[in-house]
Amino acid sequence: MSWTILNPATTKAELQPPFAEQDFAYCQALSEALLKTPQSRDFPDLIALGFWLRQANLKPLLAPYQLQDKFIRQPLGLIFHSAPANVDSLFVYSGILSLLCGNKNVIRLSSRSGGSTAVLIEKIRGLAAQFPQQNARFQLVQCGYDSAELKALISTVDGRVLWGSDQAIQAQRQLMMPAHGRELSFGHKFSLCLLGTEAVLAADNEQLQQLVQLFYRDQLTFAQQGCSSAKAVMWLGEAKQVQQAQQKFWPALTELIQQKQPLNSSEQYQALANAQQLIMSSEQQLIMSSEQQLMLTQQRSISRVAVHTLEPVFINQHQGCGLFLELQLSQLAQLNPMLTQAHQTLTVWGVDPSLLKAWLTTVYTGLDRVMPIGQALSFSPDWDGVNLIEQFSRKVVCLS
C-alpha cells in the first residue's frame, strides 16, 4: 500500500504550547461537526466522541495538568500513532490528547477501518481550511508497514503509540526509532464484568432494565471488539443464587438485544463456532468429570459458556460477537491467580465498594481500570495504567 495523506496540510506543522485555546477551539469544532451530521446516528462511537470533544468536557479534564509549580510543561515533539482496526474512532482520543499537549502528530489508519472512520476523515478534512495549523499537526495517513515513508518517519519521531494485536505491535517494533523516543503500546486485552448476585436478585424491574441497558452499552456497542468490553461475566455469590440471578438477567438482556439487533447472523454464527472452539481447546474439558465440564448455552443471539477458571486460551482465542464466558465466585480472592497482564478493565455492578477496594489492594497483576458498569468505553488520560498527558509532554524542572 502506497503512502497516502488523507488530510493534506497547507502549512508547516509547528509545536505549540500545551493546552492552547486554538487547539480547544479545534476540538469544539470537530465535536459540533460530528454531533450535527445525520451520518453519526448510525455510529454510536461518533456520538460518544462528539460529546467527549466538547470544550466543556476537555477543559475540566485537563485542568489539573495545567497547574505548574516546580516545572514547566512542554510538548514532547513529533508523535506517531498506529490506530487499531477494531474500534474506528479510538485514534482520535489519543491523537487529540497529544495535539492538546502541543505536539505534531501523524496517525496511521488501518485499511480495514469501518464506516465511522470515513465520517471522521470527512469532518477532519472539512476543518482544514479553518484550522490549518491543527490540521497540519493532526495528519492522517494510510500505508503498509514496509512503506519507505513510514520507515523514514519513525526514524525521526520523539514518541510512538501502537494500538492493535500483539502481533501487529511486534511487527511495528521492527521499525527503529531514535533512542530518546518514548513508546506506548496497547496490545491485546481481555476485560471482565463483575455482578453481585444478591443485588441482581433484589433488583426491581426498573433497576434490572437499567442494568441490562448499561451492560449492553459496554459490551455490544462494538460487538465486544473494544479492548475494554467484557468477554467474561463473573457472578459473586453462592452457586444456587447465581443460577437464579442468571435466569433473571439473561432473558432481560436478550430481549433488549432482540429490539436493537446489534449482531448480524454472521456474527452470531461466529460466536457459536468460537464457543465450541474454546470448549475443545480448554484444559478444563480434559481434566473435569462429565458433570463439571464446560457447558454451552445459546440464548437467541448470544452464546454463553460456563467455565471454572479463566484460562490463557480464552484470552487468545475469544473473538467477541456476543459470546460470554461465565464464572461463579464465592469470594473475590478466587480471581487473583487467574489474572494476568492481559486483563484490562473490570466493570462492576451490585458489589459493596469497601469489599471491592479491599480486594483490589491484593491484586498485584492484571486490571488497569475498575469502572461502574456502563462506563467501560469511556476514555480518560489514564489508560492501561499509563497517564497519556504525562507521556505526551515533557516536564522542564524549574527550581530557581
Image (tube, rainbow, N blue to C red):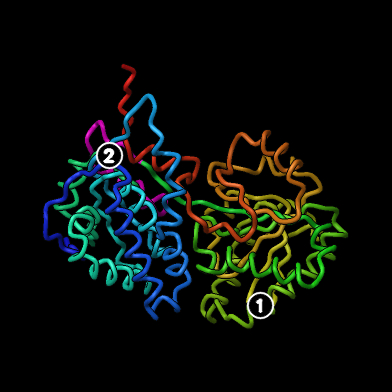
Quadrant in which the C terminus is drawn: top left
- Circle 1 crowding by C-alpha within 10 Å: few under 14, some 14–19, many from 20: some
| Residue situated in front as seen by the camera: 396 or 66 | 66
**Residue span colored magenta:** 162-183
Q: Which mark is residue 321?
A: none
Measuring 75% from the left and 59% from the top, which residue is drawn there? 293
Looking at the image, the residue that sits furthest to the top is 400
| Residue situated in front as seen by the camera: 195 or 202 | 202
Return the residue at label 1.
256
* Residue 294 place in picture, x, y as percent: 72, 61
Rendering quarter of residue 101: top left
The verdict on residue 188 being magenta is: no
| Residue situated in front as seen by the camera: 312 or 144 | 144
Local SS, label 1: helix
From the viewer's perspective, tell me whether residue 49 is left or right of residue 317. Answer: left
Above or below, 27 against 297 in this view is above
From the viewer's perspective, tell me whether residue 284 is left or right of residue 289. Answer: left
